[in-house]
Amino acid sequence: MATKRRKFNLSLPSRTLWLGERTLVVGVLNVTPDSFSDGGKFFDVSHAVQHALAMQRDGADIIDIGAESTRPGAAGISASEELRRLLPVFEALRGNLKIPISVDTQKVAVAEVALGAGAEIINDISGLRSDPRLAVVARSIACRSF
């Protein structure tokens, strides 16, 4: 017998996402030269933007954009390098993307700037182990949603 899904709403600054009514699709966009999932195919800003828009057309509910490779053995990068990769993509998508952007980062400085540039969700793959202060930044999103 199937279990009934619990339903939740996630209030974002620009909209509310309804969780549990159906499975939401997250399109992953890696703007790294060494991505383990796409081999760096979207490191170029124009290719990244085209891919984000294609994922939206294909039904993605959220676009998750990351600029630091987390593949095994990948070297970490500075917050400034991560932002250098992210911000041109965010700027090019502004006004063209109708679905929310999630920023994939483990750095407070990157999250703060990305939120100012249009991200509405923080995807921290470290689960706050890299920098617990990301919880405070995430809370600031929730406060802006009401």
Image (cartoon, rainbow, N blue to C red):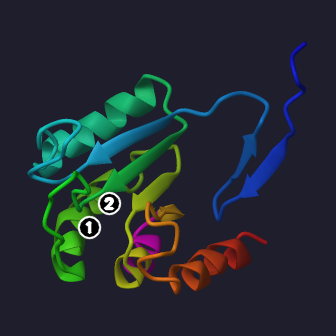
| Outermost residue to the front | 73
Tell me: 56 left or right of 61.
left
Q: Which mark is residue 30?
A: none
Picture coordinates of residue 114, whole percent (x, y): 39, 71
- SS at mark 2 in the image: helix
Magenta extent: 112-118
Which class describes the residues within 10 Å of circle 1: few (<14), some (14-19), or many (20+)?
some
User: In the displayed structure, would residue 14 be above or below residue 76?
Assistant: above
Residue 36, magenta (yes or no)? no
Find disc 1 in the rendering and name its residue. Answer: 87
Residue at 62% x, 73% y: name it.
Answer: 141
Residue type of the residue flagged with mark 1 = Leu
Q: Tell me the quarter of the image containing the N terminus.
A: top right
Total marks shown come to: 2
Q: Do the residues bearing badges 2 and 1 touch, measured as CB atoms within 8 Å?
A: yes
Q: Main secondary structure of the magenta part?
A: helix
Which quarter of the figure has residue 25? Answer: top right
Find disc 2 in the rendering and name its residue. Answer: 90
User: In the displayed structure, would residue 43 be above or below residue 124?
Assistant: above
Residue at 79% x, 50% y: name it.
Answer: 9
Give the spatial CA distance, label 2 vs label 1: 5 Å
Picture coordinates of residue 19, whole percent (x, y): 74, 41
Which quarter of the figure has residue 76? Answer: bottom left
Residue at 52% x, 44% y: name it.
Answer: 99
Picture coordinates of residue 71, whole percent (x, y): 22, 51
Q: Nearer the viewer, residue 88 or 121?
A: 121
Residue 116, magenta (yes or no)? yes
Residue type of the residue flagged with mark 2 = Phe
Residue at 46% x, 64% y: name it.
Answer: 124
